[in-house]
Amino acid sequence: MKGLFKPKPRTPVEIVRQTRDLLLFFDRPPETRETKREEKQMSELCKNIRELKSILYGNSESEPVSEACAQLTQEFFQENVLPLLIKFLPKLNLEARKDATQVVANLQRQPVQSKLIASDFLEKNIDLLDILILGYENTDMALHYGAMLRECIRHQIVAQYVLNSPHMKKFFDYIQLPNFDIAADAAATFKELLTRHKSTVAAFLSTNYEWFFAEYNSKLLESTNYITRRQAVKLLGDMLLDRSNSAVMTRYVSSRDNMRILMNLLRESSKSIQLEAFHVFKLFAANQNKPADIVGILVANKSKILRLLDDFKIDKEDEQFEADKAQVMEEIAALELRE
């Protein structure tokens, strides 16, 4: 007989509202809360967050239902649950934090009537991004907030805010944090910021060229950490070779200081750093309007550079690399000091 009296399954809207109520309960000052109820309420909250994840991602028994996902998404943002959840995240247990992180990440991609309403919500509550960015300074929260932040950057308005916020400079330090997992996560977010939205990135790099590349060169390309140098030179190539950044690329390859850094990276013992450095160095060589000081350095070091490039071999056969190398060597061999 028990089976006849099973409770009716809750709708996505009901679960979201109860989650909001529980978060509001914990948002009250501790002295106004009934301590006896706290353990039960916390257990209920964790269960709700797990249910929200199950609706959005599906489970072993069923796939997610788009209508249920849309209802959940609409209610989640309408009831202002996101700020409450982000603020309360550090007080959840590890499993609930993981579930909450996946819920927030998924909601960034959920359409409601063909519109990503998460973008509009974040535009009106942009200060939430400050909490997520500064999360990198909290060892326990960094990977959760970092994952949320990367998903939020899918929205151009969010990426634009982060790029132009005073916090952008902090990424140069976050990338070099002693905790490897956090440093790697920050590097992934940094790369996403600088490659996802082409027009926004091009405008940012043009406006902030001086300080950005001064930091990039000294803290990343000249870092004592091998992984930092390798990731930085690869990302630099991705940025400069992107057509959207052609004006920035022209400016970068007209600087002798920048070229000296790349020439040093070309001499690294690491083949992967050498190869990525070559992809950037070839832009200096291919520049048809080389400033006189760059020509002077290339001519003065011509035999050394040609010998280095001649000896530079990569493990697998690559016709494009060989063609690029031959062209760079030809360009440098033909250089002469201008009168």
Image (cartoon, helix red, strand yellow):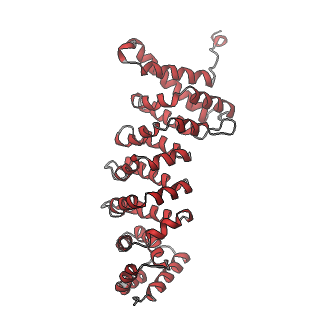
Which quadrant does the N terminus fall into? Answer: top right
* Badge count: 0
Left or right of 197? Residue 189 is left
Q: Residue furthest top?
A: 1
Q: Tell me: residue 103, above or below residue 305.
A: above
Q: Tell me: residue 222, above or below residue 324.
A: above
Q: Tell me: residue 69, above or below residue 213.
A: above
Q: Residue, x 39% and y 88% (percent of image)?
A: 337
Q: Residue, x 47% and y 71% (percent of image)?
A: 279
Left or right of 29? Residue 14 is right
Which quadrant does the C terminus fall into? Answer: bottom left
Q: Which of these two is toward me, 274 or 163?
A: 163
Left or right of 62? Residue 222 is left
On the image, the x and y values in percent for residue 287 come to: 49, 77
Q: Quadrant of residue 30?
A: top left
Q: Residue, x 39% and y 72% (percent of image)?
A: 255
Q: Which of these two is toward me, 280 or 141?
A: 280
Q: Residue, x 53% and y 67% (percent of image)?
A: 246
On the image, the x and y values in percent for residue 160 come to: 51, 48
Q: Which of these two is toward me, 316 or 216?
A: 216
Whether residue 16 is visible, yes or no, is yes
On the image, the x and y values in percent for residue 130 come to: 42, 40
Whether residue 59 is visible, yes or no, is no
On the image, the x and y values in percent for residue 9 come to: 63, 20
Q: Tell me: residue 247, above or below residue 303.
A: above
Q: Quadrant of residue 209?
A: bottom left
